[in-house]
């Protein structure tokens, strides 16, 4: 990864400025890891709406005389530019040539909207533009924290670290430290996150639940549930109030350990906390625990609470309801919620179709799943291979391999691009049909598509089944090729947790527990990701 070279501003205010960092260099892209939404008692402004006090009086008056331009018009010009190479500076300079005054408030609103729609490079370019006009736009620590977050997404973790290290001490406060902690948390850099948190402790920056929530979410994603308990204990010993999302993460941690007693104890504690009130996430987390342990009556009660707490235009709770009712085997409720969902929202997103089709296949209603799939094909805004993969996987696992191949071909013929999982489900079907060579070819295709991604590894169940088939057929050559051409390239051999479920010398006896435990780990990480998407960091 190329490290971007940051330079300190050479203006008279250089000791009070952030580090300017160009956004033109390409590198890794990271998705946002953010703090918990709904926290209002520590919500920092995106950008301070002040003009630098040491700008000349004449210059200030000139800009104040200009008519202010509506931020939304500027945002649209930026986001809808037909030329992807047109940077933010070009658009903003043109606006000023038209005699419009771009205020700090308007630019902050534009940045917020760009971040909302994940246009991180443009958002960073807006900051670069303001950084070059220090006499007009005073930089705050909130600005610096946002820029650090954007740099991590556009240029990668190393560049964000470089930016942070070169900041003057005056700009290193709880906002910028919290932003860097976010970066480490999302990248699952546990050692760096823990080290930074210790430094924050010494500086007195860990006085609010936000930073602790980040660490707990990180530990959830790594399945280190005991450390969630440790953070909770620290918060209580230091009189750091738990907010709603602290409780939700704690509940999720206990649910992942299948501790009904613990879940109910924490829920009762939360009810006695006058500062918190359970939301739909609280009850969906509890419902998940009850379903895992077969207490379906209590799960149903929780799902009714979920439904009663849905806000007007929030789609996500409906996805949870459909998925959880499907897991329970309650087809009637799945259909009811789907009908309700369709009546409320004029269009259904890909995620909505994905959730419904997945639930129907889980219920064994392949005809209805196929019908919903065909409906999606007619209305889709873009081709999401995950939706096709659900049906391809069902057909491949249930003895309808020709139908699976037909759907796979249909995907490619209609403009869809198979992903690693698409090839993986085909490989699963070939293993079931005892076609070693074809299965290996599919797994190799999957690895090629996933190369460079740390998030994909072939499912241990498929690898174990392939190895068992090789043992049965006495095909040691294919077994060795799997190791060298799939597992090694996908970085599986270095992953002790992954390899603990696979034996390369003999077939693993994977009774009801081992592989399921690994897949539960994947589900837990996905659940932690769902928690993080409800976050809205201290820097926004």
Image (tube, grey):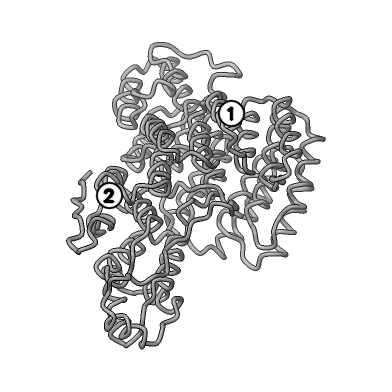
At which x and y percent is residue 119?
39, 62
Q: Residue furthest top?
A: 506
Tell me the SS state at disc 2. Answer: loop
Q: Is residue 398 visible?
A: no
Q: Residues within 10 Å of mark 1 (few under 14, many from 20)?
A: few
- Report the front residue among 459 and 412: 459
Quarter of the image containing the N terminus?
A: top left
- Report the front residue among 232 and 526: 232
- Report the front residue among 492 and 37: 37
Q: Is residue 24 left or right of residue 318?
A: left
Q: CA distance from mark 2 to mark 1?
A: 33 Å
Indicate whether 145 appears above or below 51: above
Indicate whether 47 appears above or below 529: below
| Residue under the point 27% across and 81% down | 59
At which x and y percent is residue 162?
25, 45
Tell me the SS state at disc 1. Answer: helix
At which x and y percent is residue 120?
37, 59
Query: What residue is pinned by disc 2?
Result: 167
| The quarter of the displayed image where residue 353 is located | bottom right
Q: Is residue 421 visible?
A: yes
| Residue under the point 36% across and 88% down | 65
| Residue under the point 43% across and 41% down | 186
Q: Find residue 441 and name its label.
A: none
Indicate whether 63 appears above or below 230: below
At which x and y percent is residue 126?
33, 67
Query: What residue is pinned by disc 1?
Result: 237
Q: Is residue 164 left or right of residue 284?
A: left
- Report the front residue among 294 and 435: 294
- The mark nearer the N terminus, 2 or 1, is 2
| The quarter of the displayed image where residue 324 is located | top right
């Amino acid at each position: 990864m190329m490290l971007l070279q940051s330079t300190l501003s050479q203006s008279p205010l250089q000791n009070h400025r952030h580090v300017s960092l160009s956004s033109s260099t390409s590198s890794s892209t990271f998705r946002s890891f953010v703090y918990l939404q709904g926290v209002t008692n520590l919500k920092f402004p995106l950008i301070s709406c002040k003009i630098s006090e040491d700008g000349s009086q004449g210059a200030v008056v000139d800009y104040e005389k200009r008519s202010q331009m509506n931020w939304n018009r500027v945002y649209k010009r930026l986001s809808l530019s037909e030329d992807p190479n047109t940077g933010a500076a070009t658009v903003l300079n043109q606006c000023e040539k038209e005699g419009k005054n771009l205020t700090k408030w308007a630019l902050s609103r534009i940045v917020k909207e760009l971040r909302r729609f994940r246009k991180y490079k443009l958002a960073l370019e807006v900051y670069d533009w303001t950084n070059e006009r220090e006499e007009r736009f005073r930089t705050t620590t909130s600005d610096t924290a946002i820029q650090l977050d954007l740099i991590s997404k556009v240029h990668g973790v190393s560049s964000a670290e470089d930016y942070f290290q070169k900041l003057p001490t005056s700009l290193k406060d709880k906002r910028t430290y919290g932003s860097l902690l976010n970066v480490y948390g999302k990248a699952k850099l546990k050692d760096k996150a823990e080290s930074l948190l210790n430094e924050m402790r010494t500086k007195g920056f860990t006085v609010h639940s936000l930073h602790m929530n980040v660490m707990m979410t990180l530990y959830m994603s790594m399945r280190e549930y005991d450390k969630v308990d440790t953070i909770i204990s620290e918060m209580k010993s230091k009189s750091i109030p738990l907010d709603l999302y602290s409780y939700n993460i704690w509940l999720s941690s206990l649910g992942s350990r299948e501790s009904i007693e613990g879940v109910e104890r924490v829920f009762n504690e939360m009810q006695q906390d006058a500062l918190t009130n359970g939301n739909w996430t609280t009850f969906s987390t509890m419902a998940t625990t009850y379903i895992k342990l077969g207490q379906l009556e209590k799960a149903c009660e929780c799902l009714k609470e979920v439904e009663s707490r849905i806000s007007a235009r929030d789609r996500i709770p409906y996805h949870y309801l459909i998925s959880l009712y499907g897991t329970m085997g309650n087809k009637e409720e799945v259909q009811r919620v789907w009908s309700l969902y369709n009546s409320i929202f004029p269009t259904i997103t890909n995620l909505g179709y994905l959730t419904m089709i997945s639930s129907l296949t889980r219920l064994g209603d392949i005809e209805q799943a196929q019908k919903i799939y065909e409906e999606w094909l007619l209305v889709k805004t873009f081709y999401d291979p995950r939706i096709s993969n659900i049906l391809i996987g069902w057909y491949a696992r249930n003895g309808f391999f020709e139908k699976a191949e037909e759907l796979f071909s249909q995907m490619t013929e209609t403009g869809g691009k198979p992903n690693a999982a698409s090839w993986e489900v085909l490989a699963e079907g070939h293993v079931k049909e005892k076609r070693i060579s074809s299965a290996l070819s599919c797994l190799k295709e999957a690895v090629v598509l996933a190369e460079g991604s740390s998030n994909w590894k072939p499912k241990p169940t498929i690898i174990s089944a392939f190895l068992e088939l090789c043992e049965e057929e006495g095909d040691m050559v294919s077994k060795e090729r799997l190791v060298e051409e799939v597992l090694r390239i996908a970085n599986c051999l270095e992953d002790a947790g992954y390899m603990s479920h696979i034996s390369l010398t003999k077939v693993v006896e994977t009774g009801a527990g081992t592989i399921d435990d690994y897949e539960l780990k994947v589900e837990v990480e996905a659940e932690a990701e769902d928690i993080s998407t409800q976050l809205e960091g201290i820097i926004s």
